[in-house]
Image: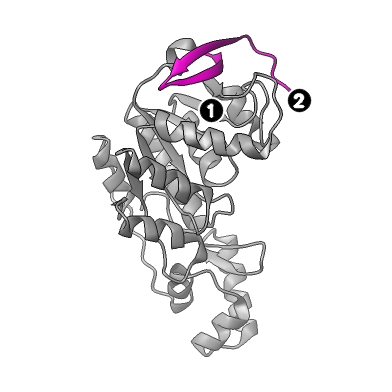
Amino acid sequence: MELHRQTFDLCCHGFDLHCAGSRELAISQHLVCVTGTRRTTPYGLALAEASGRIVAESGHVLLTTAAMGCSVAAARAALDAGGDVIVMAATGCNVPYPGTSRDVFERAGATISLAEPDAPPTRSAFKSRDHALAHIAETLVICECGMPSGVVSLAGEMLDLGKRVLAFPGSVFSQTSTGANALISCGATLLTSTTGLERKFDCVRERAPREEHVDDPLLQALVANPTRPDDLAHSLGLQPLDILRKLAAYEMDGKVQRLPDGRYAYVPHSSL
C-alpha cells in the first residue's frame, strides 16, 4: 500500500531525484550507509544494530535502502536512537519495499528515489539505485556480506570513487563473510570492533565495561561458525542428545539462535 505523501524533486550529485518528507534532510551532505547481507546471522545483525546507533549518536544522517537484513536493522536502530534517516528506495518514494520495512519508510525523515513517486519495483531499478547511492553516500559501513553480492558491487564502486568504505571481518569459514573479508583485502578499512567505528565518527562513549567470557567449547565452536548439532557432537566428542540439551538451554538464555537451515549461531552482545 502506497504512502501518498507530498513529493518534490531535487538534483543531487547529478541525479534527478523524487523525494518525500523533509527537503532540508534530503539535501544533507555527509550521508552514511550501513548495509550487508539480507540473510544475516546474529553476528551481522548485532553489528548492524550497533552501527546504526553509532551513526545516530555521532550526529550523522543514515542513508538506507531499507532492504531486509543488515540494512533495515541498522535503520531501525538509528531511528530508535533518535537519529535522522533517509531511505533511498528502488521503488518510487511513496512505495514501501519490501513491505516488511514499511515502518522504516513511515518513520524516516525523508525518502528519495530515481523512479516516479508511485513506481513499483523492477529488476533494473535496483542496479540504478545502487549506482546513484554510490555517488550520494560518503561513507559505507559493511557489517556482513558474501560473494557475489550487490553489497560487494556497491563497495567496489565507492572505492573507485574514492569514498570511505569500512568493513567488519567475519569467520573465514562463513559464507556470509567472504565478501566483507575480500573487500578488506582490496582496500576497505578494517573494523575490529564497534568502538573502532565510534572512533571513525568521533563519538567514543564512556560506558561501564561489559565483560563477556566464552568458556564453553560449544559456544567457542559457534563463535567460529554456525554449525549443525550433529556436526557439533562429532567435533566435540559429545553425545547428540547432550548437545541438543545444551543448545536448548543456551537458546532460552539468548546466547544462541537457530537459523532457518538448522544450524545454530552464537549471539554476540552488540557492544563488541
Q: Residues within 10 Å of mark 1 (few under 14, many from 20)?
A: many
Q: Quadrant of the N terminus?
A: top right
The magenta stretch spans which residues? 1-21
Secondary element at tag 2? loop
> Looking at the image, which residue is at 43% across and 21% down?
14
**Most distant residue in the right direction:** 1
> Looking at the image, which residue is at 48% across and 55% down?
145
Q: What secondary structure predominates along the stretch shown in magenta?
A: strand
Q: How is the image coloured?
A: one colour
Secondary element at tag 1? strand
**Residue 147 colored magenta?**
no
> Looking at the image, which residue is at 56% across and 39% down?
127
The amino acid type, in three-letter code, at marker 1 is: Val
Whichever of callouts 2 and 1 sits on the residue coming sooner in the sequence is 2
Q: Is residue 206 visible?
A: no
Q: Which residue is labeled 2 in the image?
A: 1
Question: Which residue is nearer to you in this view: 232 or 2?
Answer: 2
Q: Is residue 168 above or below residue 11?
A: below
Is 51 placed left or right of 249 in the picture?
left
Determine which of the numbered discs, if any, sits on residue 87 in the image. Answer: 1
Percent of width and height locating residue 254: 54, 58
Q: CA distance from mark 2 to mark 1?
A: 17 Å
Q: Is residue 24 above or below residue 68?
A: above
The amino acid type, in three-letter code, at marker 2 is: Met
Quadrant of the rendered structure where residue 113 is?
top right
Question: Which residue is nearer to you in this view: 83 or 89?
Answer: 89
